[in-house]
Amino acid sequence: MQRICLSLAGVFGLLAVGLAAIGAHAALESREMVQSVATLLGWHAPALIALGLWNRRQGFLVAAILVVGMALFAGAVLYRAFTGISLGPVAPTGGTLLMAAWALLAVVAWRR
């Protein structure tokens, strides 16, 4: 699981940099959405590194929820940015999962 967390951190970092570059050249109406996703990916990449290095089962659960939440959120926001079509509750569901993962981390950090 540690390698998975670290590999996904690399993917998140790669996507953050790539999307930041794409966002800099995107049409004005989608630029803010693309840059928002790039920022969130950039924030969550180091979190995945830390969770992978922490090497606790609960940390891997937090990482899994972060990855699923980010995939839903980023995918839906980028889809809307580039197509103009909303995927309904997909982005809010992803965002809720991201918040739940951070809350779970706060709880499991205090467990033995």
Image (tube, rainbow, N blue to C red):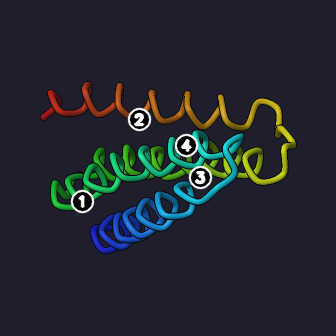
Residue receiving disc 3 = 71
Query: Badge 3: how crowded within 10 Å, few (<14), some, or many (20+)?
Result: some
In this view, 111 is above or below 9: above
User: In this rendering, which labeled residue sits more in front, label 3 or label 2?
Assistant: 3
In the figure, residue 107 lies in which quadrant?
top left
Residue receiving disc 4 = 69
Q: Secondary structure at mark 1?
A: helix
In this view, 82 is above or below 89: below
Q: Quadrant of the C terminus?
A: top left
Residue receiving disc 1 = 49
Residue receiving disc 2 = 101
In this view, 104 is above or below 18: above
Q: Is residue 110 left or right of residue 16?
A: left
User: In this rendering, which labeled residue sits more in front, label 2 or label 1?
Assistant: 1
How far apart, in angstroms, are the residues tagged by discs 3 and 2?
A: 13 Å
Q: Secondary structure at mark 4?
A: helix
Residue at the (47%, 57%) spot, across then down: 20
Q: Amino acid at mark 3?
A: Ala
